[in-house]
Amino acid sequence: IPGHTPWQLKLYALTMRVPGLIQLVMRALSVGAFRRSALGFGGCFTNPRYVDGDFGAWFVQPLATDPHVLAGQLRLLKGLDPDVLAGLRSTHAQLSAPSLLLWGSDDPFFPVSGARAMLPQFPAGAELVTLPGARLFPHEDHPEAFSAATRAFLLRHAAAD
């Protein structure tokens, strides 16, 4: 969403300014209650316990245990440029293919209203599919519905060509 920076990213950017604090936060991710909280990954899923499954093993555990992974993610956070995010509008305008925006209706990071507002930015057209009850990671919350919507979109547009 051009110009939208979730409060969570702003908070993590602030924690990087306090020496050692972000490393402490990342280590806290090994504690289930913290990991499932809004400060961890709890807001990403309909069921906060999803973060304790494969997602946690593949993405969260390495943050808490591997200093190289943590360093890479810190570089990513430090490199987030609000001007680049604001410039997404012009990037959207350059897309020549139809676009599908799959959104969780309960996404606390990027509100559906922002997705709706982006639709006119895509010159080849854009379709918004909102998955009820899903949050930031709708593909994790509702994989079957996510796959079905993606497949239908691709088949519809492949047939149009």
Image: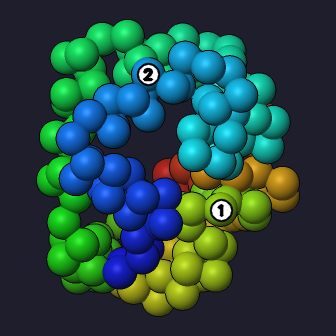
The N terminus: image quadrant: bottom left
Q: Quadrant of residue 33?
A: top right
Q: Position of residue 109 (x, y in %)?
A: 57, 62
- Label placed on residue 108: 1
User: For the image shown, how many numbered marks are present on the structure?
Assistant: 2
Q: Which mark is residue 83?
A: none
Q: In the figure, 146 relative to 58: above or below?
A: below
Label 1 to label 2: alpha-carbon separation: 24 Å
Q: Quadrant of residue 71?
A: top left
Name the mark on residue 27.
2
Viewer-side residue, 117 vs 41: 41
141, above or below 7, in the image: above
**Camera-nearest residue between 91 and 158:** 91
Q: Is residue 142 left or right of residue 7?
A: right
Identified at 62% across, 30% down, the residue is 35
Front: mark 1 or 2: 2
Question: In this rendering, would 11 be left or right of 113?
Answer: left
Q: Position of residue 145 (x, y in %)?
A: 77, 43
